[in-house]
Amino acid sequence: MNEALMKTIVTHDGGDYDKIQMIDVGFELESSIVSERVDAVTGTFINHEVPVLESKGFKTRQFNPVEYGVPNYSEIVLVTSDDTWNKDQEAIQAFWRAAKKGFEFMKENPEEALDILLRNQDKANFPLKKAIETESLKVLLPKMHSDNTEFGELDETSWEEVRNWLQEIGLITSKPEVDEMIVGVES
């Protein structure tokens, strides 16, 4: 996927993708860019790596791939097989209702939601910093909310564009119908 993103971005901007040397840095996005092992990274989140780097005194530059030919796509999508959906539909829908309830609570009470997150963090494996998580909320909340859509609503036109792009770039060989990919979940 990262290669497809870069190829689309570079080509759209008039560059030669064949001149790009892709290096797999695993999850070492921050250290790779700071140590100048790489000139740029993909796979970062503007609500995480950017505030983390800036909190350490590193200025970042980022851009939206959509402005360079990549179709607008959902960053985080919940996916299940047909078998799992058929077997565990009630539990999946209960999870979705809880996620929606949590999102609504966060929108209405961002400071309290942040305090709950910090109280329940995994300090040993993934310690959080209040200043970074506060900045993350400032970045995310406007992007995650629209008065015109429900929580988790998927735009079928956007999915058609993504599906077409995935086929054009060679990541999929067939074009599944959008209504076969998306199943509505009861709110």
Image (cartoon, rainbow, N blue to C red):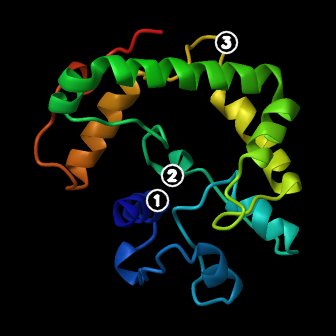
Q: Which residue is mark 1?
A: 9
Q: How many marks?
A: 3
What secondary structure is marked by label 1? Answer: helix
First of labels 1, 2 by sequence position: 1
CA–CA distance between discs 2 and 3?
A: 27 Å
Query: Badges 1 and 2: C-beta atoms under 8 Å apart?
Result: yes
CA–CA distance between discs 1 and 3?
A: 30 Å
Query: Badges 2 and 3: C-beta atoms under 8 Å apart?
Result: no
Type of amino acid at the residue the image marks with label 1: Ile
Q: Which residue is mark 3?
A: 147
**At which x and y percent is residue 98?**
55, 22
Type of amino acid at the residue the image marks with label 2: Tyr
- Residue drawn 37% across the image and 24% down it: 92
Mark 1 or mark 3, whichever is nearer to me: 3
- Would residue 122 appear left or right of 183 to someone viewing this image? right
**At which x and y percent is residue 13?**
50, 60
Type of amino acid at the residue the image marks with label 3: Asp
Dot 2 alpha-carbon crowd within 10 angstroms: few under 14, some 14 to 19, many 20 or more: some
What secondary structure is marked by label 3? Answer: loop
Foreground of the two, 18 or 47: 47
Q: Which mark is residue 117?
A: none
First of labels 1, 3 by sequence position: 1
1 up-or-down from 25: above or below: above
